[in-house]
Amino acid sequence: MSTHQMTARTCSAFKNHPQHLPWASLFAPIPFLLASLFSLFPLASLAADKVDIIPVTVEAVKESSFADGVKEVGKISAIDSAVLNFNASEKISAIHFSNGDTVTKGQVIAEQDNTKAKADLDKAKSTLALAKTKLERIEDLLIKEPFALAKQDVDELRENVNLADADVRQKQATMNDYLITAPFDGQLTSFSQSIGSQIGAGTALVTLYSLNPVEVRYAISQKDLGKAQKGQGVNVTVEAYGNTEFKGLVNYVAPAVDESSGRVEIHATLDNPEFKLAPGMFANIKQFYSHDIKHLLVPQNSIIANNDERFVWLVRGDNAVKQVVKLAQNTNDGYAVVLEGLAEGDLVVKTGMQNLKSDGKVKVIQDKNTLEDVASTGPNPKASLDTAPSASAGSSPDTSSSPDTSANLNPDNSKPDTNPSASADTSSSSNTSSDTSSDTSSGGAK
């Protein structure tokens, strides 16, 4: 007979015949009731001792190389450019090139009417010829009769020849005032006047640009003055050619900070054999201060914010361990740079951290990234892995691609974005906002 049946029968008997029941019979079921209650305590104790095992996915902390540099906006400029004009006031008699043509050094681009100047040159040449003829006759005479003419008169004739020769050279130089020749190889702009136009001395007719190489000019923050040096590499993109990069070298770093802007002017030369880069173009510049800087990377969605504190959950053995970290910046591809707190190969929880507690039990669910991490890093004594469908983790695994190690690095940037989903342990946490200045890499932290 069960305890419940005995209790029911006793209560029924007491109700029907309470005056005939002895006290011994009335309290007889009590031991059975107590025994039943005590038998339930082990089950309750086992339920209380049961530990929740949280399924999580993880990814190993990786080391990547970075290039420390800066991103700025500047303008393309011609290294050599010249505004071409005549040195005389006359009508234009000839233009030998069209708008936009390329020319080589020494080619005649345009001419003025030089009729008068040419006549003056011819006259000077005649005067020179006459002076030379007179001197030659006197010299022949002096050979026959040495004392036929005073030495002073002979010297005067020689000076007349020299003066006539100088006049000819002057007139020849004047002829060049009526010509425009190319001072270097380059490309012409449009002509401001046409043939037959009267043009004054010094009035611009056309501009010539040397387009290979060209120069990009920009300015950096004065805090980077100590990093910038001649010979450092730059990558330049312009809107006209999308993501096509033009490579160059820094050839000028201003020795002083500009007083009005507080910035430092930089020039860099770029090869431009196809003349794709034109003076006046706006350009986006990446200047590299140094290369191959090693830093650790952690998935950005693994980072949890608690006011100013940033931390991640690590898996060690089958336990979850909270680890405070110091961060630099995001790489704009799902990762953040870690300065302190982690070591290469640490397994960081990516999903399932909402219910984690310090030293809580976890079960690592293998997703694609976890398998790749284990294959690349080998057995890791810090974590134990169990194979199970990733859906049991309670959320989809992060399938972010490997970090872009070409991202610029500046550890002084603000803290990166943190995982908004991990709010269970950080109900009062708040994500930091972007505070990246124009002097840091555009891939800066948020």
Image (cartoon, rainbow, N blue to C red):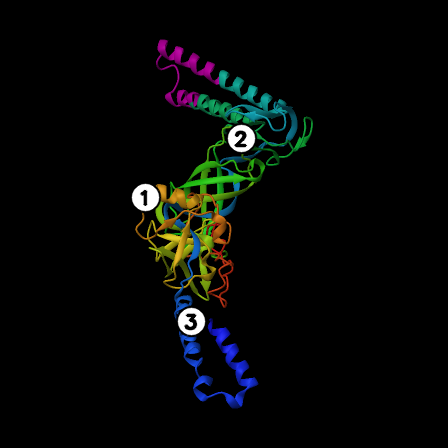
252 part of magenta stretch: no
How many C-alpha atoms fall within 10 Å of the one at disc 2: few (<14), some, or many (≥20)?
few
The amino acid pointed to by label 2 is Phe
Above or below residue 360? Residue 192 is: above
Q: Position of residue 419 (x, y in %)?
A: 49, 57
How far apart marks 3 and 1 lie (CA) works out to 48 Å
Contact (Cβ within 8 Å) of mark 2 with mark 1 = no
Q: Circle 3 is placed at which residue position? A: 40
Magenta region: which residues? 131-158
Which quadrant of the view contains residue 323?
Answer: bottom left
The extreme top residue here reads 144
Depth check: give the residue in front, 375 or 82.
375
Above or below residue 436? Residue 126 is: above
Q: Circle 2 is placed at which residue position? A: 275
Tag in front: 2 or 3: 3
Which quadrant of the view contains residue 110?
Answer: top right
Q: Circle 1 is placed at which residue position? A: 378
Q: Position of residue 300 (x, y in %)?
A: 46, 53
Residue 415 seen anywhere in this rendered image of the structure:
no
Q: Which mark is residue 250?
A: none
Q: Position of residue 353 (x, y in %)?
A: 45, 58
The amino acid pointed to by label 1 is Gly
Q: What residue lies at 53% left-to-right and 23% top-to-bottom? A: 107
